[in-house]
Image: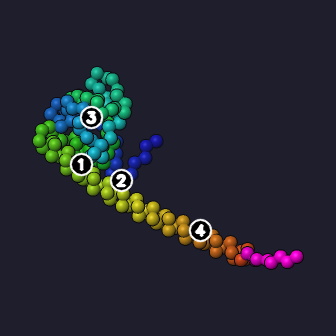
Amino acid sequence: MLRLSGDYTVMEMEVQPDDWLADKELAELGLRQEGVVVLGIQRENGRYVGAPKGHTHICPGDVLILYGRLPLLNELDQRGAGWTGEQSHQKAVAQQQRNLAKQDREEAEDNQRERRFQHTKGQRIRYELRKRVGRPQCYNQRG
């Protein structure tokens, strides 16, 4: 079962000869820097490459199975080769860096709230135990 949230999605994208992706290796593209993960490649000859590595060559006619944010994947599908494609890539990398910084801040805030909640919860539990049991008594033993 696949559960995605927000604008994250999985989509297929057929590589055209004039696409920015065409005739390059995955490592050269730097898609992960944009927040895009290539899950697999369906080759035109019918062969499937699952979890492709950086040296995997992208060919026109390949169908890429991609994971990422829908607006970015749609832009990537329209991204042409050449200088404008490189510019679009750089903009997408910068946007992903901002997204990651925001995500890190939100996660830190969530962790801080959770720690405060756990601390408060622990105080409440100790208070309830004291109410039920009472404070421990100290006895002096004399012989």
Give the structural element (helix, strand or loop) at label 2: loop
The residue pinned by badge 3 equals 26
Kind of residue indicated by mark 2: Gly
Foreground of the two, 81 or 1: 81
Q: Please tell me in which quadrant of the rendered image residue 65 appears.
A: top left
Q: Main secondary structure of the magenta part?
A: loop
Residue that sits furthest to the right in the current view: 143
Query: Which region of the structure is painted magenta?
Result: 136-143
How far apart are the alpha carbons under marks 4 and 1?
Answer: 43 Å
Q: Earlier in the sequence, mark 1 or mark 3?
A: 3
Describe residue 23's horizontal placement relative to residue 140 as left or right: left
Tell me, yes or no, whether the two marked residues, 1 and 3, touch with CB atoms within 8 Å.
no
Q: Which mark is residue 122?
A: 4
How far apart are the alpha carbons under marks 4 and 2?
Answer: 33 Å
Q: Earlier in the sequence, mark 4 or mark 1?
A: 1
The residue pinned by badge 2 equals 6
Q: Residue at x 15, y 42 (%)?
A: 85
Give the structural element (helix, strand or loop) at label 4: helix
